[in-house]
Every structure is written in C-alpha cells, then in structure tokens.
Image (cartoon, rainbow, N blue to C red):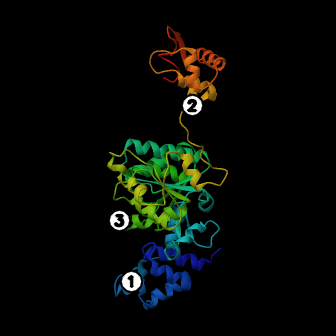
Amino acid sequence: MISAEERLARALLTRIAEPGDELLGRLIGKEGAIGALDVVRSGSPPGTGSAGSGKDGAARRFAAWRARLPDADPERLLAECDALGGRLICPGDAEWPSQLDDLGDRRPYALWVRGDQDLRFGCLRSVAIVGSRSATSYGINVAAEMGAELAERGWTVVSGGAFGIDAASHRGVLAADGLTVAVFACGFDVTYPSSHAGLFAEIARYGLLVSELPPGAPPTRGRFLVRNRTIAALTRGTVVVEAARRSGAISTARHARDLRRAVMVVPGPVTSAASAGCHVLLREWGEAVCVTDTAEVLDLVGLIGDDLAPERRGPVLDRDRLDPVTRDVLEAIPGRGGAGTARIAVAAGVDLDTALAGLGALSAAGFVERCAKGWRLRRRSPDR
C-alpha cells in the first residue's frame, strides 16, 4: 500500500495536469509523485527534450500546473469521491491493474473508480469493444450479442460509455449479468452523454465506472483520445465493430497494436460507410484479425487449448455421407437422360456387381431412379 501522502499527491496531480502527459510521467518515475509536486512547486522544470511542445513546451506546462495548484485541494477531492461512493486507486495498491504499467511514461497517475467490483481482478480476463457512435442496427446487434456472450463465458467487457457500439456492448453485458467497465473522459460523476444516466447507474451498480480525472472534471475532445489508451491497456485485446475512416475506435485499436495487444475487427457490408474504417484496418494493418463471433475473439485472447474456436465448415450434404465407391457410381450417371448399368460401371471404374449394389443404395437414398434407358438422376434428389 502507498502512503497517505503519496495518495494525496497523486490525487492532486490528476487535478492539475492532463492525463497521460509524458513529461510529468517521466518526472513521477524519477522523483515519485511527492517529489514531482515539489519540482512543480519550485517552478524549475527539467530540460524540454523531446517531450516539449516546441522550445518552451515544458515551461508552459509547468506554468499551467503551478497556476492550478492554489485551487486544488486533494483532501476535498478524496472526500467528494468518498461521498459519491468512489475511491482512488494508485500504482502500488492491490487493486491497481498492473497491465497499465505497459504504458510507461503515459501510465495514469491514478484512477478514480466507482463500483463494488475489483478493477484488477475484473480486468484479468477482459476485452475492449469499441466502435462508431453513429452505429447501424447491424453494428448494435453484433456489439450487444458479443458483449452478452463474452459475459456468459466469464469475460469482462471494457468500453467508453458513448453512443452506439459502446453503449450496446455495455447493455449486452448487463443483460447477461456480467461485469462491464466504462472508462470516462471526464469525472465518473459527470453524465456524458446525459441520456446515458440510467445506463451509467446500472454500470455503477453491477460493474465499474473508471476515470483518470477527478470528480467534476468535464469532458474535452483531447481527453477522449487520451482515454482510449487506457481502454486498450486494460484489456487483452480490442474488438472494433464499426468505425468510419476517421474514428476514435481506430485510435483505440492503434494503442492496442502499439501495446502488442490483439486487434480484432468485425467486417461490415462493403457498401457501408460505417464500416469503412474496419475494412481499412483489415486491408492495411497486418496485425488486425477478422473476427465474426465471440468464439473467434476468445481464440485470440483466451488460454491456449481452452478457448480455441471451432473449425469452420460448410453444411454437411447427404452425398458427403456416401462411401467413395458409391459416390463414384453417382458421378458416373449422366446429368441428362439415362444410362444402363454396364455403361455406368465402366464410367465409374467398377465391376457390374459393385455398380448394381451402388445403384441400389443410391435408389434407396433417393438419388437415382429407373428409367427406359436404365438409370437416371432423380429430379429432386437430396443434393440437387
């Protein structure tokens, strides 16, 4: 467990800095959260290096962080979080998901969480389902069914709580009494979009609401993009159900690829603009894998030998059940008209007795019938 002072420092950092800032991440890695705050208060930023946005990038960010310090009260933030039924999870806590450490300097400073489930345990077997806000009925059905089926198999589904695919996947999990995690780009007490108030209440009751931002923090465009890296890092793989050519879902997939997580894509109709981004991923990304159902998802992210997808085969036809010799006899019968037994035997490469036995079996099975010329194919045989 981390110290109370370290927890307060990390709570304060989530208030004064934007999530995923690499400059601050490196400073925390070197000095710890308390030491990083001391450096910020001193007003002496380290060299800009590659982290600066231009020549004075680091200096501007340090100035912004220092300007926010007087209005930031970490003890009040923690009290507000507790009053909302939430908690702050920090690196070093038992509930901290260690896979987030793969983000390196972009790792969250801490996570504000609401819900009774254990975040670390819940994300040990988890999959992200993301996609378009303007989803089609096709995409919504796929996301909801996949979410429900993953939940039935004991997997957690992580998404962003947005319109369309995100909401459908969350609802699918809740319908199956499973665990779902919504990662916000605002405080977990901020209902965005507002029409999802009921959905978020259900997730808070049965799953988890997670944010890198403290209670009350509003969403911004940049925060949504930064949030996507956390969704990708929490899970073993990301499934993109529908995505346009420009889509936040593709951003999540890109983070998953960079983290060496599985990137899975559900194909859509080639005429659908809602799936154009999915098809780009499949065509241009060597790492992206086409998936069409839950079994294929688990084949990529599950345990070797335990979660293999069944081999895909076409329908078994009646002729597939015939033995090879009888099948040869069937193939020897002309498509039009009829033929005598001797002619069929020669064409099939068998003796007369074998041809007679095969024709008898084929007649009993409904493949052939007698005619004036001998034998012919039945007009409505099992496979024709």
Q: Nearer the viewer, residue 381 or 115?
A: 381
Q: Where in the figure is residue 69, as x and y percent of width and height?
A: 43, 81
**Mark 1 sits on what residue?**
52
Q: Where in the figure is residue 200, as x and y percent of width and height?
A: 47, 52
Q: In the shown orientation, is residue 148 left or right of residue 130? A: right
Q: CA distance from mark 1 to mark 3?
A: 21 Å
Q: Amino acid at mark 2?
A: Val
Q: Where in the figure is residue 112, as x and y percent of width and height?
A: 52, 66
Task: Give the structural element (helix, strand or loop) at label 3.
Answer: helix
Q: Is residue 215 visible?
A: no
Mark 2 surroundings within 10 Å by alpha-carbon count, few (fewer than 14), some (14 through 19), many (20 or more): few
Mark 3 surroundings within 10 Å by alpha-carbon count, few (fewer than 14), some (14 through 19), many (20 or more): few
Q: In the shown orientation, is residue 199 left or right of residue 272? A: right
Frontmost of labels 2 and 3 is: 2
Which residue is pictured at 46% across the width and 78% down the height? 22
Frontmost of labels 1 and 2 is: 2
In terms of image quadrants, where is residue 303?
bottom right
Mark 1 surroundings within 10 Å by alpha-carbon count, few (fewer than 14), some (14 through 19), many (20 or more): some
Mark 1 and mark 2 lie on one chain; the one further toward the N terminus is 1
**Mark 3 sits on what residue?**
221
- Decide: is 314 above or below 179: above
Q: Which mark is residue 19?
A: none
Quarter containing the N terminus: bottom right
Mark 1 and mark 3 lie on one chain; the one further toward the N terminus is 1
Q: Which mark is residue 316?
A: 2
- Decide: is 80 above or below 7: above
In terms of image quadrants, where is residue 285?
bottom left
Which residue is pictured at 56% across the width and 44% down the height? 149
Q: Is residue 378 visible?
A: yes
